[in-house]
Amino acid sequence: MITNKKHNQIIEHKDKTINDYYAKIVKLEKELEQAKDLKLILEKLYPKFIYGSSVIGVNFSSDGYKLDLGENVLVYVDDILGGKVIKQEGNKCLVIDNDGTVKTGLTKQKVDKGYSYKLVRK
């Protein structure tokens, strides 16, 4: 059995929760508008702007935007053998598993003598 006091407490808690949700919705709508404004600004800068000595391009798609960094900007990528490697300094690597699956990627390990890539058999 619920008393009037308990009933009023439940209603007050429900009202507070609803007000919290409304506040979050307003905040998210404001952030969405700011993101749209930022997208418009970036579209005006499209296609290129200068960062140091490198030309950086901005590509827009339905997934968002992507910065195309010039070749002068060092970019870290995943090493296929684990860790990180600088894209510009990485060596091509082929990894062949026991079942014959071949993966390609970059590695920081030295290439095989006389070859332009590193071959790893697992």
Image (cartoon, helix red, strand yellow):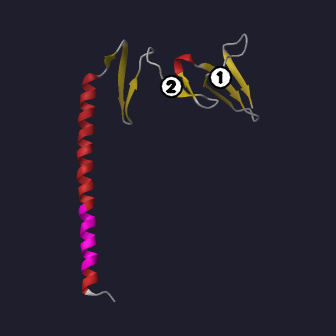
Question: Is 73 inside the magenta-drawn segment?
Answer: no
Answer few, some or many: residues within 10 Å of disc 2's Cα (few below 14, many 20 plus, some between 14 and 19): some
Position of residue 43 measured from the top left corner of the image (x, y, whole percent): 27, 27
Q: Mark on residue 74?
A: none
Q: Amino acid at mark 2?
A: Tyr
The correct choice, above or below, for 42 with respect to 35 in the image is: above
Secondary structure under badge 1?
A: strand
Q: Is residue 37 left or right of residue 64?
A: left
Extreme residue in the right direction? 98
Residue at the image point whose x is 39% and y is 36% from the top: 63
Secondary structure under badge 2?
A: strand
Question: Principal SS element in the magenta part?
Answer: helix
Residue at the image point whose x is 61% and y is 22% from the top: 108
Residue at the image point whose x is 38% and y is 25% from the top: 67
Figure quadrant of the C terminus: top right
Q: Amino acid at mark 1?
A: Cys
Position of residue 88 measured from the top left corner of the image (x, y, whole percent): 52, 17
The correct choice, above or below, for 7 with respect to 107 in the image is: below
On the image, which quarter does residue 121 sit in? top right
Query: Marks 2 and 1: in contact by CB < 8 Å?
Result: no
| First to last magenta residue range | 8-19
On the image, which quarter does residue 61 sit in? top left
Position of residue 59 measured from the top left corner of the image (x, y, whole percent): 36, 26
Q: Mark on residue 93?
A: 1
Extreme residue in the bottom direction? 1
The residue that label 2 is drawn on is: 76
Q: CA distance from mark 1 to mark 2?
A: 16 Å
Q: Nearer the viewer, residue 98 or 13?
A: 13
Position of residue 68 measured from the top left corner of the image (x, y, whole percent): 40, 22
Q: How many marks?
A: 2
The correct choice, above or below, for 79 with respect to 30 in the image is: above
Figure quadrant of the N terminus: bottom left
